[in-house]
C-alpha cells in the first residue's frame, strides 16, 4: 500500500525501521522546530512500543507474559491497556479477532495500528495536521482543507502482483489491509484454530487506524458474506474484499477511486 499526495504539494519524508517493518512519515508542513521535535517523539514512541510488545525480543513485556513469567494483573500498564483493547476487539468482531487464538496472549494484531494512530496524533497535536503515517501498509492520513489536503492511498491487488486494486481518497482517514499476499494464510480463525482461507485480502477504511486494522483482520476470518453484513453495523467504517475465487466486493460507502489499467 503506497501513499501519494496531490500534484503541486512539496512534502518531506522520514522512514523508520521499527516493529518488524518500516514506518514512513510524509508531512506537507513546514519543517518547524515544533514539528521536528514531534516527529522525534513519534519515532521514539514507536520504538518504545516495539521494546514492550515485540514477541521477538526475549525481554519484552509481551514475551515475559507469553512465557508465563508475569500475569495479566502484574504486567506493565501499557500491556494491560492493550489487552483490554483486545477484549473489546473480541467483542466488537463477534469473536473473529482473538488475541489468544494460539492459547497464549498475542496482541500484535492490534498493536501496530494502535501505535501508528498514536504517532500520527503526536504530529497532529504539534500542528502537523496535513500528514500521513504508513506503518507497513496500514495508513493514517489527515489533510488540510482544500483540494491539496486530499490523500490518495493505493491498495494492492492480491490477484495481480505489482498492480493496484483501487485507490482510496480521503482527507481524514485510516486505511488498513490484511491479506495472504506476503505471508500466506497466516491469520488463524479462532473458531476452528485453522488458517482463514476464504479471502485473499480485506481492506477497511474508517476514522481510527486501531479499529480499521482490527476489523480488516476480523474480516479475513469472517469471510466476504458475513464480513460485509457485519461492517454495516460499524458507523464510519467501510470494507473492500477479494475472495479466494477472485471476486472483489466493496461496501456501498467505500471511499475509493477505481484504479486505471
Image (tube, rainbow, N blue to C red):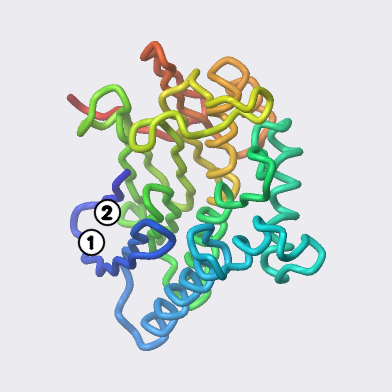
Residue count near mark 1 (Cα–Cα under 10 Å), binned few <14, some 14–19, many ≥20: few
Residue furthest toward the right? 73
User: Which residue is pictured at 29% across the width and 66% down the height?
Assistant: 15
Q: Position of residue 37 (x, y in %)?
A: 41, 85
Along the line of sight, which residue is nearer the eye, 207 or 147?
Answer: 207
> Residue drawn at (33%, 44%), measured in percent from left and top?
153
Label annotation for residue 129 = none
34 and 163: which one is in front? 163
Q: Quadrant of residue 128?
A: bottom left
Is 87 left, or right, of 2 in this rendering? right
User: Which residue sits at x=25%, y=69%?
Assistant: 12
Q: From what the image shows, is residue 56 above or below residue 212?
A: below
Residue occupied by mark 2: 5
Estimate how packed mark 2 is, as few (under 14), some (14 to 19) or many (20 or more) residues with alpha carbons within 10 Å.
many
CA gap, disc 2 to disc 1?
Answer: 7 Å
Q: Which mark is residue 9?
A: 1
Q: Is residue 238 above or below residue 251?
A: below
Mark 2 touching mark 1, by CB under 8 A?
A: yes
Q: What's the residue at 68%, 60% (across, down)?
A: 65
In screen coordinates, is 68 left or right of 127? Answer: right
Depth check: 114 or 72 in front?
72
Report the front residue among 140 and 65. Answer: 65
Left/right placement of residue 191 relative to residue 256 reads: right
Up/down of 188 relative to 123, above or below: above
Amino acid at each position: 500500500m503506497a501513499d501519494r499526495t496531490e500534484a503541486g504539494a512539496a512534502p518531506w519524508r522520514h522512514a523508520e525501521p521499527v516493529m518488524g517493518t518500516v514506518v514512513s512519515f510524509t508531512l506537507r508542513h513546514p519543517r518547524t522546530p515544533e514539528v521536528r521535535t514531534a516527529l522525534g517523539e513519534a519515532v521514539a514512541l514507536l520504538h518504545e512500543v516495539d521494546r514492550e510488545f515485540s514477541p521477538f525480543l526475549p525481554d519484552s513485556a509481551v514475551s515475559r507474559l507469553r512465557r508465563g513469567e508475569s500475569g495479566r494483573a502484574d504486567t506493565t500498564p501499557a500491556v494491560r491497556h492493550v489487552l483490554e483493547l483486545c477484549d473489546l476487539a473480541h467483542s466488537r468482531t463477534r469473536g473473529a479477532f482473538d488475541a489468544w487464538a494460539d492459547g497464549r496472549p498475542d496482541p500484535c494484531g492490534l498493536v501496530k495500528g494502535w501505535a501508528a494512530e498514536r504517532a500520527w496524533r503526536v504530529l497532529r497535536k504539534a500542528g502537523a495536521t496535513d500528514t500521513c503515517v504508513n506503518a507497513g501498509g496500514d495508513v493514517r492520513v489527515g489533510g488540510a482543507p482544500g483540494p491539496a489536503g486530499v490523500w490518495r492511498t493505493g491498495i494492492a491487488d492480491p490477484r495481480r502482483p505489482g498492480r493496484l486494486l483501487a485507490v482510496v481518497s480521503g482527507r481524514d482517514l485510516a486505511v488498513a489491509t490484511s491479506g495472504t499476499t506476503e505471508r500466506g494464510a497466516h491469520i488463524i480463525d479462532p473458531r476452528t484454530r485453522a488458517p482463514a482461507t476464504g479471502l485473499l485480502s480485506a481492506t477497511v477504511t474508517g476514522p481510527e487506524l486501531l479499529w480499521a486494522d482490527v476489523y480488516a483482520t476480523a474480516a479475513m476470518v469472517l469471510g466476504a458474506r458475513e464480513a460485509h453484513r457485519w461492517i454495516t453495523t460499524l458507523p464510519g467504517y467501510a470494507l473492500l474484499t477479494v475472495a479466494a475465487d477472485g471476486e472483489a466486493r466493496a461496501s456501498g460507502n467505500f471511499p475509493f477511486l477505481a484504479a486505471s489499467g
